[in-house]
Image (tube, grey):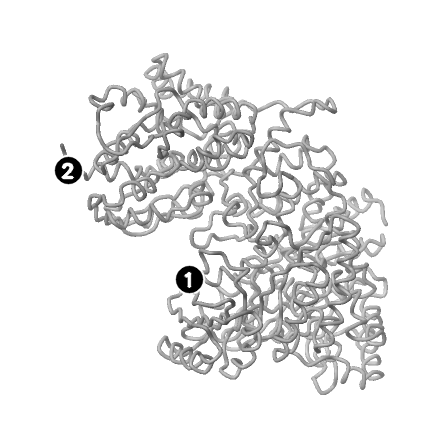
Amino acid sequence: MADARNLERALRAAVRGGEVEFGAQDRALMTMDASNYRRVPLGVVAPRDDDDVAAALAVCREQGVPVVARGAGTSIAGQATGVGVVLDFTRHMRTIEQLDPDARTAVVRPGVILDDLRGAAGAFGLTFGPDPSTHSRCTLGGMIGNNSCGSHSVAWGTTADNVHELEVLTYAGERARLGRGGEGVPERLRAGVSSLVQGELARLRTGFPELPRRISGYALDELLPEKGEDWARAFTGSEGTLGVLTRATVKLVPTPGARVLAILGYADESAAAEAAAGLLQHQPLTVEGMANDLVSDASRASLPRGGAWLFVEVGGDDAAHAKANAEALCAAAREGTTAHALVTDPAGQRSLWRVREDASGTATRMPDGSEAWPGWEDCAVPPARLGAYLRDFRKLLGEYGLRGLPYGHFGDGCIHVRIDFDLLGQAGIAKFRDFSTALADTVVAHGGSLSGEHGDGQARAELLPRMYGEEMVGLFGRFKDLWDPAGGLNPGMLVRPDPLDANLRFAPLPRNPVDVEFGYPHDGGDFSAAVRRCVGVAKCRNETASGASVMCPSFRATGEEKHSTRGRARLLHEMLAGEVVTDGWQSEEVHDALDLCLSCKGCKSDCPVGVDMATYKAEFLHHYHKGDDKTGTPGKRRPMAHYSMGWLPLWLRLAATSRTVPLLNAGARVPPLAALAKRLGGLAPERDIPALPRTPFTHWWRKQPGRAEAGGKPVVLWPDTFTNYLSPEAGSAAVRVFQDAGLRPVVPPKQVCCGLTYVSTGQLDKARAVMRRTLDRIEPALDAGLPVAVLEPPCAAALQTDVPELLSDDPRAKRLAKAVRTFAQTLEEHAPDWEPPRVDRPVAGQTHCHQHAVIGEAADKRLRERAGLTGELSGGCCGLAGNFGFEKGHYEVSAACADDQLLPALREAAPGTEILADGYSCRTQMDQLGGYSSRHLAEVLAEHLPRR
């Protein structure tokens, strides 16, 4: 292998347009894809054009360095990892160069995201047929490399069925245009491959199983004369081992005028599997299957009765035609079903499809919380044999003492599954190998393919001889050598592969739990297990927010992998591994990536496996600044913002008790004084310092006559820092509403605090002290069994999650967490017969990201509906996120996050719209960036109560 420094210098001199990156952070971000495997590259090149690709290949060829082309890094078999130079196509080579609706073709660069192509084609009533569940972030180059399929392949086939012409560069620097007939193929290559094919006609005509999802191996049979010598199809699915794709002409298909989703219930998984093939005669667009062990209780409530389900999408010229087709299919299938339902509205269909699309992440955790892994993610058998195969598969799992949750493309006979292999110990790894060999034989016995969608990579390539025989695999090797005689493209994949149990991503992780502060109750208290939650499916890399999705606002603002939840998790993984990122908790690479994490907690709910980067960030910052007493490693100096914003509850209390609020407000209005204060406090100079109310909520409360003698059911009204010192009007409004609803607010006589500002800045020792003092003060209310109403959503979320996780040794923390309710939840649970006043206005504004992630807003929606407040609040994150948007260096990202969903929604709001935001940060962001005045829901309802 070449010297990394010489290689970097040569690449920087040769690559004129793109980036060349050899830093520890850059390499760490590319060590893994969505598989079980990990390989450490020497460096990363992000080319801007063909010339950059050619230049990078020339340098690597000269120095004997391998090259792997990479798209979104969602491959599940390991083929997007590499030990040499990674070509990252997601940054620049992502142009849709031409879209011809008449010819139904598009010319794209390899980094084009599938949903971008589908969106552009949709303007003409067209789409690209293959649609894997990662369609919002996977690239066309990656799809061509893996021959991706997706749920609509029963109608529109695999990626290979939808490519027309490909332009590639070989490792030797040859340019080839691949299509039918091979006219654009270099003569050396064409002559060699033609000789190979002509010499093996009989084997190529008989050696490949006939099934819709045969993805394993090279598609050498596509070069047969009777198939038109289709070089583009033969290249598709070659996993970057033959050439580097630089441009593709792909086919587009018409989209149906309307779609209906038929959900068919069955007694069990086998019954659903056996029924799937019989539905194909009705020409459905999809036939997807999943059993009840992969469906949450909440999702199951929206499904018809059954132990397993087929999701069958049916198209038509219009809504009536699609519904008639769906009804005909259901009628034909009725005898074997337990129940069925038709979903005609697009929003309902999207909601149900999200259950299916998130399965690749949710399946990585078994119902008891234990880990499960890919490896046998997508084998396929003839659809008619799927039921019998699944029975054998379940039997084999039992024989090895393993568990898995199968689901997938039942109409194509393709099954996805994550299995609870123990990949941390030698015995478990040996079982992984033995089971893999046995399952390969089972798949072959049913006439199947080891891969039915995601390719062989390292996960299955070693077992290809069991499917094809040694002679055919030998042909694959000869085919590879004709394209790449130097073996420089993605070595160790598909041909002459690394063993399936080598390069496992878990190998370098510490075997003993790391000393941490949070409890990580869902990961057995093990920080490594928490970090392992990220399996790389990269839902966090969505560039546009869909629906109420929050994750990941910083990635959408910057587009950089290190600012995605996955990127940060990868860096934490490498920090624990200690091979690439070597400074442990004092790592600047990790700190840099976490700096723009808003701690919005969106990933806690939106990530399919519940990665909680806000907690991981707080954990990291604690150790980063505290240092390690055991090793004598000093901590890093805290920024002033950690004191000005992290200690905000203390400063606000001192300002109120010292009666200096008028003086502080006056000073904040004098530009030089305000600038000095912001500079000393480490705050963003672009920000205004909010004015402080003269009277805190608790001071107002103590002056209320008859508050102690009032009747009604007692409810603790939590005087959080933001409500008490920054927006007391929300607190007084809540008092009026609660009293009107027959509740009696009780406010703690001494200050209580959830510790959120200390947690978000990683001051966990201080947070614990604040939390324990709070528990001491609130304990009498807990003993009395009183509900605790919290007006500020992030404080409610912190009380429900951060407090019990930091104080796992104190049972009062869990008692408090169970007692906490939001404003709307309090009214719904404790005043169910109360009728809110009618407001009858449309609404806009923001659902706080912590409420979305931890609590949900179902009760808020119901309360708004009862009050006649119509419409939806924005999802996403406002971008202020407590201290984040006020810290120096964060303003641009903070503003970009606000402009993602919130500000556009406000600009489009009709006159008279009521602007709502229960979070103080959200209200502040709307005011400072757009001049919008917004209120807590309690204020709006209180305004419309009858005057007393």
Disc 2 is placed on an element classified as loop
- Whole-angstrom CA distance, mark 1 to mark 2, is 40 Å
Q: Is residue 60 left or right of residue 793?
A: right
Tell me where residue 688 sits by quadrant: top left
Amino acid identity at mark 1: Ser
Residue drawn where x is 56% and y is 48% of the image: 559
* Rendering coords of residue 876 (x, y %): 44, 46
* Rendering coords of residue 225 (x, y %): 74, 86
Q: Residues within 10 Å of mark 2 (few under 14, many from 20)?
A: few
Viewer-side label of 1, 2: 1
Is 606 placed above or below 107 here? above
Question: Mark 1 — residue?
Answer: 302
Q: Which mark is residue 946?
A: 2
* Rendering coords of residue 751 (x, y %): 39, 21
Amino acid identity at mark 2: Pro
Is 333 placed above or below 810 here? below
Tell me where residue 940 sits by quadrant: top left
